[in-house]
Image: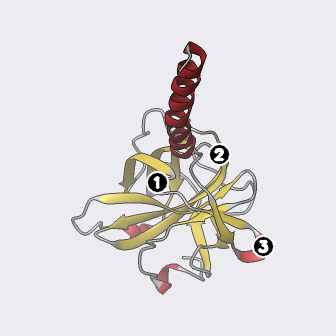
Amino acid sequence: MTTRGIFSSVAAAVLAAAIPAMTLAQTTNAPQGAITGVGKKGKEHRNFAEPLKVSNCNPERKGTMVTSGYTAGYYPVGIGPYWGWPSVYGPTYYQRQYVSANPTLAIEYANNTDIVMKQIEFGLVVRGELLAEVKDVGTFSPGAEIKHEFGVNNNVFPLRHGIPECIPLKITFEDGTTWHNPHLPALRRQLYGHRP
């Protein structure tokens, strides 16, 4: 075999070994949130394991103590003390306006995906029971730390000796696609459909 033939054989072997490695790298570096189907109104929905990283969930009976570094979460201007929207469960949920002397919920979180988020519905859960919802609206870029406080209803308290969790229930992305939590807490009908 000539030197040129040996070189060609070695090059072919190296290339054959490199192709599976390149394919594996392309597979593992694929972006999260593959589109998995079509939801309501023709909008596609995404599949993320953990789209948000929630680092603080702090409900307060009286929000008289200002939580350092937090700002008021989204609330539409000029609509009165309660804001309603169709919840991920279907019926309308009414969120109380943020007023520091009333009960509040402080949430610190970050977008754990590579796609900008526009709306997030959170559920306040204690010992597996859904106690309240809040909705945040804005431009939530990947990795950006968000620290918002929301108004919640008096009926959230007492917390029944449990550790509060703030879990995402539904997320709407900038491109119009959505994510729904595949493990929603059980529906509590008394939380929905009427102003408290």
Q: At numbered mark 1, what does the secondary structure look like: helix, strand or loop?
A: loop
Residue 42: assigned label = 3
Q: For mark 2, what is the residue?
A: 115
**Pointer 1 residue:** 50
Left or right: where 125 falls relative to 38: left
Label located before the other in sequence (1 or 2) = 1
Disc 2 versus disc 3: distance between alpha carbons? 20 Å
Residue drawn at (57%, 41%), measured in percent from left and top?
Answer: 26
Question: Quick one: which residue is furthest to the top in this view?
Answer: 3
Which color mode does the image show?
secondary structure
Q: Is residue 56 above or below residue 182?
A: above
Q: Which of the pair 146/49 is nearer the observer?
A: 49
Q: Amino acid at mark 2?
A: Ile
Residue with the most extreme bottom position: 189
Q: Which mark is residue 19?
A: none
| Vertical relation: 125 (above or below) 73 | below
Q: Nearer the viewer, residue 103 or 144?
A: 144
